[in-house]
Image: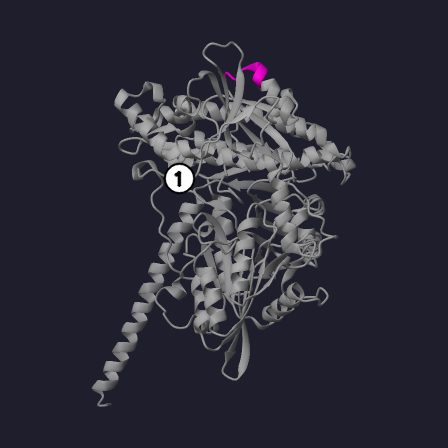
Amino acid sequence: MNDSLAQSILDDDDDTDLADHPTSMPVADDFKPDDPTLYLNRELTWLAFNQRVLHEADDPRTPLLERVKFLAIVSNNLDEFFMKRIGGLKQQIAVGVHKPSIDGRTPTEQLKTCQAQVREMHAEQNRIFDELMVLVAEHGIRILQIKDLALDARERLRDHFRANIFPMLTPLAMDPAHPFPFISNLALNLLVTLRYPAGSESYMARVKVPVHRDVSKRLIPLDGGTTFVTLEDLIVANLDMLFPGMVIDSAELFRVTRNAIVEPDMEAATDLLELIETELRERHFAPIVRLEVQEGFDPVHRGMLAAELGLNEEQDVVTVVGMMQLRDLFEIAGLDFPDLKDAPHRPVDHPLLANDRRNIFHIIRENGPILLQHPYQPFSTSVERFLRTAADDPKVLAIKMTLYRTSAGAILDSLIEAARNGKQVAVLVELQARFDEAANIGWARRLEAEGIHVNYGVLGLKTHSKLIFIVRRDYAQLRRYYHIGTGNYHPGTAKLYTDLGMLGCDEEIGQDLTELFNYLTGYSPPPSYRKILAAPYNLKRCIIDKINREIEHQRRDGSGLIQMKMNALEDVEITRALYRATRAGVRVDLIIRDTCRFRPGLPGISDKARVISIVGRFLEHGRIMYFRNGGDEEYYIGSADMMGRNLDSRVEVHAPVENPELRQELRLILDVQFADKRSAWDMDSDGHYTQRTPTEENAKGAQETLMAVAEKRLAAAGKHKEKKIRSRLLSHFQWRLRGND
C-alpha cells in the first residue's frame, strides 16, 4: 500500500526487536555526534513500525473486520519492504559495500537482522490469522477447502473453473527440453509433480495462479458471498482437466519477490520518459530477493527452486504456515458488515466553503488563507472545487501543477477542461514515483494529447512537492492563488490519509511559486525564496538554522521549544541538530509515524525529548513544523519528511502558516495528538514503543477528537451564518417599516 494505511505500535511486552536496537547507552560527558549508539537503524525501525501495524490486527478493541484489514496491510507492507529495502541491501552486498551505516551496521548485518525479525513477524501473522478466522467464522465468514464442501457445491465450482479459469491457465513443463520458466514478481504459482499412470518417473510443471481483480479474484465467493474458497485450491481440485490422463502426486504453492530498485542512468539519459519505461521493463526481470513456500513443501523441491532462482535456501526462503499472500484479505475486510467495522466517517465541508457557493477565489481573497484538514474535510469540495473553478473561470489565465500520484477523475478532468477553455496549463508529472511509474506515464500522455504542457521536472531530482498554482486577472491586476499540501492529489488516499493543505493568495508566496515553477519547467537557476522553504535548495539549511536559533533562545531565557510532526526522521544532519538542541535544554516533541533514528530520554543528551506515534483508522501523513522562536512563533506545513532523500534529492516545499486563526488550528492538532491516551504510543530510549492506557474520560483517540472538532466547527459556522442572515433580514424589514422602499 504505497505510502500505506498501515500504522500501529509495538506492544510493551513484545521484545521481538530488542536485539535490533543499541544496547549501550551514549555517555553525556563524552558526547560524540558520530557515536553509532545515538542512532536507530532505518530498516529496523521501519520493521518495528510494521510490527505496530500488526498489533492493530491483534488488538481486540479494534473492530473485527478492521483487524482483518490491518493484517492485510502488514502483508502488503512486507512485500514492499522486500522489494525496496531488502532489495537495496542485497544490491549493496553484491557490489561489495562494507561501510557501516550511521548506526554502525554493515549491509550484511542489516540484512541478517531484518530477515530474522521478519521470520518472527511471519509467525505472529500466522497466529493472528488463525485467531481472526475463528472470530469471523462466528459471523458466517469462512475460507473453506474444496474437499470439505458438499458434492453439489464442488460441481458448481468445477463448472465455474471450466468456464472462467481453465482458459487462462498455461502449464509450463520443467525438464531438460524446457528451460526453467520465468516467475513473475508476487505471483502465486503451483509446482505440480505428476507422472504417467503406468510409469514411475516424475515430471514437474509450473502453473501460474491467474489472480485478477476483475476476472478471477483470489477468494471465490460461494452462495451468500461470505463463504470463500481460494483460487489456487480450485485449480488444484481440477488439475485433472489441465493434465488429462496423468497422476497428480503433489501441487505445492510458492511465490517470489523481486527487487524493485533498478537505478536508471540519469547522467546518460536523453529522454526521461523512455528511460523510465526501460526501467519498468527491467524491473520485471529484476533479481529475486525472497522465495515463499507453503508449509509441507517437499525439501527437495524447495532446494531445487532456491538453486534455480539463485537464492540462499537458509536465508532467502520463507515457509508460510496458513494462507500465503495475506494482502488478499482486503476482500474479506471489504464485506458489508457495518457492525464489524469502524463507524462510517463522513467528512464535513470546511466552514468557509460549506454554504458559500460564490467563486472560490472570491472566498479566498475575502477571508484570507484557508487551512484544509483531510479526511475530516472532503477533498472534493475543497481542492477539486479549487481546480474545477479555475478550469471554468474566464478570468483564470494559467494553471501550473505538480502531480506525484493521482488517479483518473476530477483532477485530470479539470486540467483537460482548462486547456480546452484556452488557458495555459502546465503540469509536472513525476515519472519516478515508486510503483506509480506506469500510471504516471499514462497520465502524462493523456494530458499531452489534450495540448497540456507536460514536464518531467529537473533531471536527477524527484518532484515530490504538492502544488497547484493559478494566475487570475483580478480587476486591473494579476493575482496568484495556490494550494500547498502535504498529500498527493489523489481522491482515494485523501479519504484514508490525514493530510493538510492551504489555499491562499499571499503575494510573496505567489512570487516564490512563480520562480519555483520556472525552475522546474525551464532552465533558470535555483532561486532564493522570500517565504517558502524548498528542497534541495534551502529547506535543510533553514531547518537546522531554526533549530540552532532555539538553542540560542534556550540559553538566553529558557524558552526553546521545537515540535515536529512527520512520517519519518532519518536524516543524520537533522538528527544531530536535534541532539544539539536537547543537550542545550531545548524541549523537543516529535510525532513520527514510522522510521526514527532519534533516541529520546538519553540521560544528559535527550532528557527533554519525547517521540510518539499515532495509531488510528487513518494513516497519519500530515507534516507540521513548529518553532517557538522566543514567542515570535513559526508554523510550517509541507511535503517533506526529514529524510536524506527528501531533503537532498527531491523538490519539496514547506510554506509558513502566518494567519493567527490557522495557527490555532495547527496548535490544536499538535496538542490533541500529544495528549492522546487511546491511539498514541511513546518511544523509549531503546526505540521500543509503549501504548498509552486510556481512561473512560479520554477513551477517544486523536483522530476521533479531530473528527468531532470538524463537525462542531461546521455546525457553529452554520449557526453564525444563520444568525448573520437573520440579522440582515431584520435590519432590512426595519428599514422597510421606516417607510423606505
The residue at 42%/18% (across/down) is: 245
The answer to which of 547 and 349 lies nearer the viewer is 349
Q: Residues within 10 Å of mark 1 (few under 14, many from 20)?
A: few
- Residue 500 in picture, x, y percent from top left: 50, 55
Specify whether 278 is left or right of 168: right
**Residue 329 visible:** yes
Specify whether 101 is left or right of 366: right
Q: Is 741 within the magenta?
A: no
Q: In the figure, 192 relative to 26: above or below?
A: above
- Residue 642 in picture, x, y percent from top left: 64, 48
**Residue 560 visible:** no
- Residue 282 in picture, x, y percent from top left: 64, 42
Q: Which image quarter: residue 231?
A: top left
Q: Which image quarter: residue 48?
A: top right
Q: In the figure, 601 relative to 369: above or below?
A: above
| Range of residues picked out in magenta | 295-301
The answer to which of 549 and 566 lies nearer the viewer is 566
Specify whether 269 is left or right of 725: right
Amino acid bearing label 1: Val
- Residue 50 in picture, x, y percent from top left: 54, 34
Colour mapping used in the image? one colour
Q: Quadrant of the C terminus?
A: bottom left
The answer to which of 258 and 165 lies nearer the viewer is 165
> Which residue lies under the disc numbered 1?
215
Q: In the figure, 678 relative to 502: above or below?
A: above
The kind of secondary structure element at disc 1 is loop
Q: In the figure, 19 relative to 504: above or below?
A: above
